[in-house]
Image (spheres, rainbow, N blue to C red):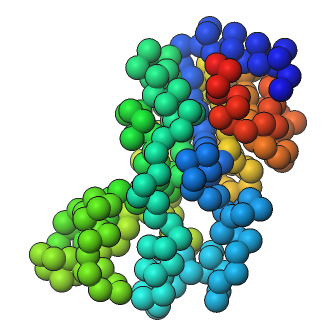
Amino acid sequence: MDQQKTEKLRAWVGEAQRIVFFGGAGVSTESGIPDFRGVDGLYHQQFREPPETIISHTYYLKKPKVFFEFYRTRMLYPDAQPNTAHRKLAQWEQEGKLLAVVTQNIDGLHQMAGSRSVYELHGSVHRNICLGCGRVYDLAQFMALEGDVPVCSSCGGRVKPDVVLYEEALDMHTIQGAVDAIRRADLLIVAGTSLTVYPAAAFLDEYPGNRLVLINKTPTKRDDIADLVFHEGLGDVFAQL
């Protein structure tokens, strides 16, 4: 690892008062949760249909049994624990240095580590809502529901995970909160994301400062606009901070 770049990042973190962290699937791979586009990710595995088809709104409506089989076996990792990056970000928030975490992940590991100001762009597996009566189930309660298609124990309505499926729109309140935080940041750290999914990838354009840090194992299409780039594992970088 380039020690000069590491020292610069350490200095920036030390001087910062409004850090915003924007993370993708690569943040959670070190907790044992596979990403989508990596070598071992979901998009490189063989299924009867492409994952992006199975976890779409249309598929959820037309083939709910197959959707929930895939969701339960491929999207839920109830035993996953926060890693070095999650814990460091929670520490910065407790120290008053971190303004917000913006995440594309649905695993809730940031909150498990202690972070409170978290904008979950794609929702969370820890919230599951009955479409009939509105009852909310946490992850353990959801996993305990019987049947190929989970139904509410109160009213019998279908229980839908509060995650954003393909074809569904992101929550505008969450987007606005994330963008507002990025606009206020004095240090923006973007990590574990290939920056290919929009509109989230465009959030970088909302950052007005000159301390944009990109951390990703492979190059991204936005490396050229960053002020500091690390092609390293996130845990390796954060272990130096």
Report the front residue among 123 and 33: 33
Q: Is residue 63 above or below residue 201?
A: below
Q: Is residue 204 above or below residue 38?
A: above
Q: Residue furthest left?
A: 154
Q: Position of residue 72 (x, y in %)?
A: 44, 73
Q: Is residue 55 above or below residue 198?
A: below
- How many numbered circles are shown? 0
Report the front residue among 206 and 126: 126
Q: Residue at x 86, y 22 (%)?
A: 2
Any part of residue 60 in sight: no
**Residue 105 located left or right of residue 152:** right
Identify the image quadrant of residue 234.
top right
Q: Residue at x 61, y 80 (%)?
A: 53
Identify the image quadrant of residue 166.
bottom right
**Residue 24 located left or right of residue 219:** left
Any part of residue 81 in sight: yes
Q: Residue at x 25, y 65 (%)?
A: 141
Q: Position of residue 5 (x, y in %)?
A: 82, 19
Q: Quadrant of the C terminus?
A: top right
Q: Quadrant of the N terminus?
A: top right
**Residue 162 located left or right of residue 16:** left
**Residue 87 located left or right of residue 221:** left
Q: Residue at x 57, y 56 (%)?
A: 33
Q: Position of residue 187 (x, y in %)?
A: 64, 22
Q: Position of residue 209 (x, y in %)?
A: 69, 22
